[in-house]
Image (cartoon, grey):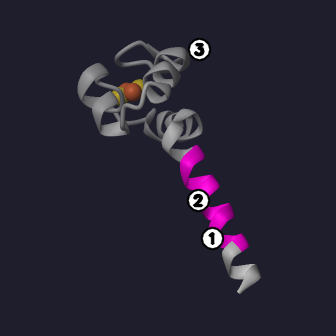
């Protein structure tokens, strides 16, 4: 599915970039996502956030913090 119509960028391309560790700013610079009309930015950011490995690490860290808080 095309996410960014202006630049013809698909959800697969954004997901692949996110999984490789690229930040959203990097994807914008590299591919031009959300740099013209901006209509795709919300969807593109949500997709990036879902697929970014950084989000998984943050989620694990949050669980550890919660466990530490519960044991204290
Ligand atoms: S649809 Fe992505 S910038 Fe226009």
Secondary element at image label 2: helix
The residue beneath circle 3 is: 1
Residue depicted at 36% across the width and 19% down the height: 6
- Check mark 1 vs ligand 1: CB closer than 8 Å? yes or no: no
Local crowd size for mark 1, using a 10 Å CA cut-off: few (<14), some (14–19), many (≥20) = few
The residue beneath circle 1 is: 65
Q: Is residue 69 magenta?
A: no
Q: Earlier in the sequence, mark 2 or mark 3?
A: 3
Q: Is residue 61 magenta?
A: yes
Relative height, residue 25 to residue 20 (above, below):
below
Whether residue 35 sits left or right of residue 41 in the image: it is left
Residue 62 location (% of width, % of height):
62, 63
Task: Name, please, the residue furthest toward the front.
Answer: 71
Instruction: Identify the magenta region.
Output: 56-67
Q: How far is the residue under mark 2 from the one under mark 1?
A: 6 Å
The residue beneath circle 2 is: 61
């Amino acid at each position: 599915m095309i996410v960014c119509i202006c630049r013809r960028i698909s959800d697969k391309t954004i997901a692949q970039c996110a999984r490789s560790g690229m930040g959203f700013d990097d994807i914008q610079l590299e591919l031009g996502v959300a740099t013209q009309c901006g209509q795709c930015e919300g969807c593109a950011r949500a997709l990036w956030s879902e697929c970014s490995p950084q989000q998984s690490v943050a989620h694990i860290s949050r669980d550890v913090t919660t466990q530490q808080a519960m044991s204290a």
